[in-house]
Amino acid sequence: MICGTDEAGRGPIAGPVVAAAVILDPDNPIEGLNDSKKLSEKKREKLSLEIKEKALYWAIAQSDPDEIEAINILWASMKAMQRAVEALPVKPDMVLVDGNRVPELKVPAKAIVGGDASEQCIAAASILAKVERDRQMLKWHELYPQYEFDKHKAYGTPKHLELLEKHGPCPIHRKGFNPVKRLLANL
């Protein structure tokens, strides 16, 4: 069984990095899988439901902002992917990882740059991770509406940076990320 894993949320300046691991059913293909960044939100939502329904196995895990601060975003991403793979109820024969590094796993793994666009199982993981992270950011928006996380999902957009400047960071902002770090240095 081949598992794909990918993460969502390395670039934002707030919130968790979320990873998913997916083992697709070769006898039950899913049309339209692609890198989550190349799909509309509506298409991702639809595919997420289909992946959860048709995949043999899937799991989602994350690293929260405190862990990101403690070990940096790269290692937090690796940790989230490791957790997702380990959360599967079966041990895959091989794990395909989007990117140029593989997390520490107890099974063989291969990094594939651009894998979320070339490997169906990685694309599926990319979609699950992105949809889950976006949903979490909508929940964070309810707690911190002044940052408008519902609009930018915590990416460092001009509007988010403006709101960060106006309100200062909230507990889920990544204090080691430059825009937040600069703001904190000037307080």
Image (cartoon, rainbow, N blue to C red):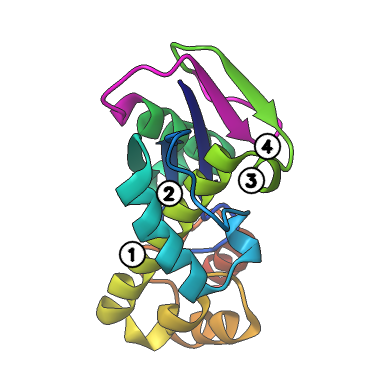
Residue 29 picture location, percent across and down: 49, 44
Q: Residue at x 47, y 75 (%)?
A: 42
Question: In percent of the image, x 35 and y 38: which residue is there?
Answer: 58
Residue 57 sits in which quadrant? top left
Q: CA distance from mark 4 to mark 2?
A: 15 Å
Badge 2 is on which residue?
Answer: 18
Residue nearest the viewer, comparing 27 with 19 = 27
State left or right for residue 167 relative to residue 89: right
Q: Amino acid at mark 2?
A: Val
Rendered residue at 34%/43% (across/down): 60
- The spot of residue 48 in percent (x, y) is 40, 58
Residue 3: percent from left, percent from top: 48, 28
Disc number placed over residue 99 in the picture, else none:
4
Marks 1 and 4 close (CB-CB < 8 Å) = no
Q: Amino acid at mark 1?
A: Gln
Read off the residue under disc 1.
Answer: 136
> Comparing marks 3 and 2, which lies closer to the viewer?
3
Say which label, 3 or 2, has the lower sequence index. Answer: 2
Disc 4 versus disc 3: nearer the observer: 3
Q: Are marks 3 and 2 in contact (CB under 8 Å)?
A: no
Q: Is residue 184 magenta?
A: no
Identify the magenta region: 86-104
User: Which residue lies at the image location 31% right of the left edge and 50% below the top edge?
Assistant: 53
Q: How many residues crowd around disc 1 within 10 Å: few (fewer than 14), some, or many (20 or more)?
A: some
Q: Name which of mark 4 and mark 3 comes first in the sequence.
A: 4
Which residue in the structure is indicated by mark 3? 116
Circles 1 and 2: CB distance less than 8 Å? Answer: yes
Kind of residue at disc 4: Gly
Say what amino acid the circle numbered 3 marks.
Answer: Asp
